[in-house]
Image: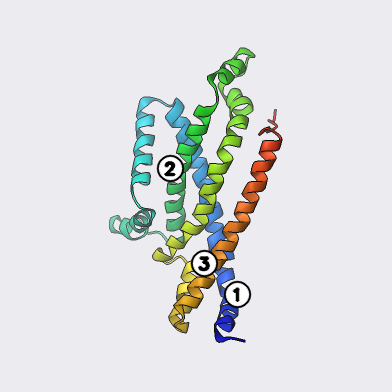
Amino acid sequence: MPPWLSLMLDSLPSLLWACLLFTIPLTLLSFILGLSLGFLAAIARLFGPRPVVALVKFYVWIIRGTPLLVQLFLIFYGLPSIGIVLDAFPAALIGFTLNVGAYTSEIIRAVLLSVPKGQWEAAYSIGMTWPQAMRRAILPQATRVAIPPLSNTFISLVKDTSLAAAITVPELFRAGQRIVATSYEPLILYVEVALIYLVVSSVLSSLQARVERSFSRYGGFIEAGA
């Protein structure tokens, strides 16, 4: 067996363990929390009072206008100077959540605005309240439009979690760095890390395509609860 292949096989369990234990949980938690934050921010920006709208705009402007790596450094290395000390994983989770929230808020705001106003009027004309109209008429239509950009955001987040290595989160890329430090084979190890990211992203892209086809087939219908 070639030495490079032996090294890759020996390193694979450690890399996969870091992916399963840190990269995937960090991605899922950040996306779920960020999506929730983004939805609230979008609703606040569309329907909230002016002070709230201004606050949401400021939040989105700050997050979208600064690099994610800088945001992570501010949270992990900057906040201790004012007495706020966070462990690496919570700091990364907060940073990614805020970042995802800003970007998904713009996606959600755009898809809500894409629903014709006549749908609101039709919902109100049959006696629906605002929450009922949003849940039963608007969100089912907006969801189909939102799935592709939100899925792309999720796939990008998988790769962006590699930035958490800079604040010592022992995720996939950090695990690769540690093995490189002892094996002195950066090319082989970083290619292996890249391949793992590629496989995960490819699987998610395939799932995204299946979900999009499903929503296209059924017209984006979502059965609303009572």
User: Which residue occupies the extreme left position in the image?
Assistant: 81
Q: Which sits in the foreground, 108 or 36?
A: 108
Amino acid type, residue under disc 2 in the picture: Ala
Q: Quadrant of the C terminus?
A: top right
Residue in the picture at 46% in, 65% down: 169
Q: Which residue is identified by label 1?
A: 13
Task: Decide which of tag 2 and tag 1 comes sooner along the chain.
Answer: 1
Q: What kind of element bears circle 2?
A: helix
Amino acid type, residue under disc 3 in the picture: Ala
Q: Quadrant of the N terminus?
A: bottom right
Q: Is residue 118 above or below residue 199?
A: above
Residue in the picture at 55% in, 67% down: 195
Q: Residues within 10 Å of mark 3 (few under 14, many from 20)?
A: some
Q: What kind of element bears circle 3?
A: helix
Task: Decide which of tag 1 and tag 3 comes sooner along the chain.
Answer: 1
Q: Which sits in the foreground, 10 or 187?
A: 187
Quadrant in the picture for residue 116: top right
User: Does 215 sit left or right of 98 as displayed?
Assistant: right
Amino acid type, residue under disc 1 in the picture: Pro
Q: Which residue is identified by label 3?
A: 194
The disc placed on residue 102 is: 2
Residue in the picture at 59% in, 75% down: 12
Q: Is residue 59 above or below residue 179?
A: above
User: Does 72 sit left or right of 193 as displayed?
Assistant: left
Q: Residues within 10 Å of mark 1 (few under 14, many from 20)?
A: few
